[in-house]
Amino acid sequence: MARTAKKTTAKKTTKKTAGAKSSAKSVSKQAPAAKNNEGMVTLEKLYKFNLFSTIVNLAFAVLSVLFVSRNTVDFTLAHATKDALSGSSAMGPAYKILATVEIRYLMAFIFVLGAIFSLLLATKLRKNYEAGVKGSAAGWRWASMGITLGLILELATILGGIGDIFTLKLVGTLTFTAAILAWLNEKQNKGTKKQYAVFALGVFTGFAAWVPLAGSLLGTALYGAANFSWYVYTLAVLVLIGSLSIGLNQYRHARDGVTAKGYLQLEGKYLSTDFLVKLAVFAVLLIALHK
């Protein structure tokens, strides 16, 4: 009887030990999942990121005014006028300077605008913005990103030697239009739908916005007596990389479709790319044009 009792106790102990091991295994299996969830994008994290972006963009604006030099750019209006040197009535191209603005104030304007948009996404527009994210089409974020990236491309274009006001506004308008087309493309490609017409139109519009800057850089390299400063080319490359990254994510969305949870991760990539472009613009111009 004593031996039987010992065996029974030993079996119970073995079962408890096995149960404890299995529990430990299940906990260890769940631990990586918990760690993975920590890196997942949530609506709360988007809210916090937009608040963070608001503060950082305001800091960029203040630092730009304080530490960037007083270098200026001219906004011009192209027109035709009589060529006085030729002594004939022939008309020739001319430019009227409409305004001369310090680069640091243009930078500050872009960053302040970025801060305002981020703050709106975190406060007044939060419900509408989060509803768009849940619906896999964040229209308000596309609108804000289209405006700020359009202004950044305008800044790169004017630093690249093109100051004509109508050309600059065309660059900004095309960039904003490409962003709106990206939003429409998302609305078309919810779930597993695959439609590429609006995506292709958006890509064409986005590349068209780069034509003036690309033409000026190429023309200067081929025929100019001197090249632009290094920061002009660096700025153009960084903004191009950011634009291509956004376009690539948009293409994957159109190709694969995306669930509501999947779009949260995609939204995180869009916001981080937009933020990194602004950070790169600030860093390059601060290094190149510091006092």
Image (cartoon, rainbow, N blue to C red):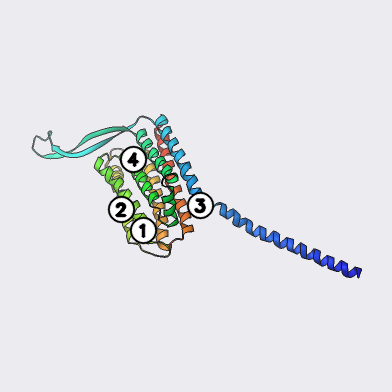
Q: Are marks 2 and 3 in contact (CB under 8 Å)?
A: no
Which residue is at 43% across, 50% downward? 127
Q: Could you say where residue 88 lies in the image, as x and y percent from the top left?
A: 8, 37
**Distance between mark 2 and mark 4 Cα atoms:** 18 Å
**Distance between mark 2 and mark 3 Cα atoms:** 31 Å
Q: Could you say where residue 70 lies in the image, as x and y percent from the top left?
A: 35, 29
Q: Secondary structure at mark 1?
A: helix
Residue at mark 1: 185
Seen in the picture, residue 273 relative to 135 is either above or below; the reply is above
**Distance between mark 1 and mark 3 Cα atoms:** 23 Å
Horizontal placement of 123 versus 147: left or right?
A: right
On the question of residue 274 being in view, the answer is: yes
Residue at mark 2: 205
Mark closest to the chain's N terminus, 1 or 4: 4
User: Looking at the rendered structure, which numbered label has been put on residue 155?
Assistant: 4
Mark nearest the camera among 1 and 3 is 3
Which residue is at 74% across, 63% downward? 19
**Distance between mark 3 and mark 4 Cα atoms:** 33 Å
Q: Residues within 10 Å of mark 1 (few under 14, many from 20)?
A: many
Q: Toward the viewer: 47 or 72?
A: 47
Seen in the picture, residue 105 relative to 48 is either above or below; the reply is above
Amino acid found under the numbered disc labelled 3: Thr
